[in-house]
Amino acid sequence: GAGGASSSSSSSSGHVPYRNSKLTFLLQDSLGGGAKVMMFVNASPAKWSQQETLCSLKFAQRCAAVQLGQAKRSSESAEVAALRRQIERLEAAARAAKA
């Protein structure tokens, strides 16, 4: 889940499993790159919520240990660049046809 995404974002594999949970998938723009994340943990002294509190605290501990590097500039592939040029040519042709 979210723990997997936060712990793997600091690993050298480069792959962050955002799709392992709905939460991390929805928050993927906020969990990577140069984003800053603040985490709140709801801890309860009630005995019936002891396991949930412990899981939340362990997750927060893993998140606190993550060290993200500098955001990397995304370079578009040659295929994407070629498609952008084709779109520009088609748009220019459409404008010329209207004139």
Image (tube, rainbow, N blue to C red):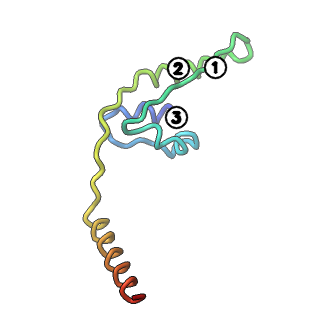
- Which residue lies at the image location 50% right of the left edge and 31% below the top edge? 3
Of residue 46 and residue 37, the one placed in the foreground of this image is 37
Residue 58 marker: 2
Residue type at numbered disc 3: Ala
Earlier in the chain: of badge 2 and badge 3, it is 3
Task: Read off the residue under disc 1.
Answer: 42
Q: CA distance from mark 2 to mark 3?
A: 12 Å
Rendered location of residue 47, percent (x, y): 73, 11
Task: Read off the residue under disc 3.
Answer: 2
Earlier in the chain: of badge 2 and badge 1, it is 1
- Which residue lies at the image location 38% right of the left edge and 78% below the top edge? 91
Of residue 83 and residue 41, the one placed in the foreground of this image is 83
94 sits to left or right of 25: left
Q: CA distance from mark 1 to mark 3?
A: 16 Å
Of residue 44 and residue 78, the one placed in the foreground of this image is 78
Rendered location of residue 36, percent (x, y): 43, 31
Q: CA distance from mark 2 to mark 1?
A: 12 Å
Q: Are marks 2 and 1 in contact (CB under 8 Å)?
A: no
Rendered location of residue 79, percent (x, y): 29, 67
Question: Which quadrant holds residue 35?
Answer: top left
Q: Secondary structure at mark 2?
A: helix
Residue type at numbered disc 2: Lys
- Which residue lies at the image location 39% right of the left edge and 88% below the top edge? 99
- Disc 1 crowd rating (10 Å Cα; few below 14, some 14-19, many 20+) is few
98 sits to left or right of 82: right
22 sits to left or right of 46: left
Q: Nearer the viewer, mark 1 or mark 3?
A: 1
Q: Are marks 2 and 3 in contact (CB under 8 Å)?
A: no
Q: Secondary structure at mark 3?
A: helix
